Amino acid sequence: MNASIQVDITYLSTRDEACVGFDDPGKAKLAAAAMYDSGADIVYHAARTAGTGVFQAAVERQKRAIGSESDQYETADPAFRHVIMTSMVRRVDVAVFGFIKAYVEGGVEPGVETYDLEHDGVVCSTSGGFIDDIIDQLDDYSTRIVDGEIAVPASPS
């Protein structure tokens, strides 16, 4: 890990607006452009359809972006593929399968079920081959997170 890496956070909505910004590509494009113009090399979005604006800003500034929810290399406009280095994919299929299996086996319990790295609930997409050279490192970090060697904060600071 590189301790000199700086993480900047920009929200597209205030708490009072709920998720309004998640569907505003223009707002996301402005936010990403400002981050790139301030020196960011990569912008990761978790902004639903607004993520298109992040990809637009990345194309315009010849930078990289990280998608979310699904493998956005496969689902975004092909004109953006060359800037989408990976996506953080929520494995909803794993959660649905787990629920159906528990239901069939008569073991559905009320409460919250967490699908994190330990439960195969999230993965990095590898489409495009941009992260092929670091897959082993990512797997190592994932293992260290699951084993508790690396603590991941529950909320951004």
Image (tube, rainbow, N blue to C red):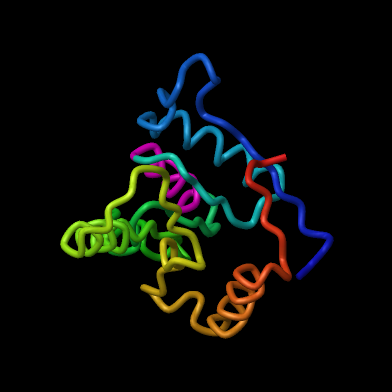
Q: Which residues are magenta?
A: 49-60
Q: Quadrant of residue 20?
A: top left
Q: Position of residue 42 (x, y in %)?
A: 59, 56
Q: Residue furthest top?
A: 16
In the image, residue 134 above or below residue 153: below
In the image, residue 141 above or below residue 8: below
| Residue in the foreground of this view, choosing between 26 and 61 | 26
In the image, residue 144 above or below residue 101: below
| Residue in the foreground of this view, choosing between 149 and 87 | 149
Q: Quadrant of residue 100?
A: bottom left
Going by the image, does 93 lie left or right of 132? Answer: left
| Residue in the foreground of this view, choosing between 70 and 108 | 108
Going by the image, does 15 lie left or right of 99? Answer: right
Q: Position of residue 52 (x, y in %)?
A: 37, 44
Q: Residue furthest left?
A: 104
Q: Residue at x 45, y 65 (%)?
A: 86
Position of the N terminus by quadrant: bottom right
In this rendering, the count of numbered labels is: 0
Q: Residue at x 45, y 61 (%)?
A: 83
Q: Position of residue 139 (x, y in %)?
A: 56, 79
In the image, residue 100 above or below residue 125: above
Q: Quadrant of residue 91?
A: bottom left
Q: Residue at x 45, y 53 (%)?
A: 114
Majority SS type along the magenta span: helix
Going by the image, does 14 lie left or right of 9? Answer: left
58 falls in the magenta region: yes
Position of the C terminus by quadrant: top right
| Residue in the foreground of this view, choosing between 134 and 96 | 96
Q: Residue at x 44, y 62 (%)?
A: 122
97 falls in the magenta region: no
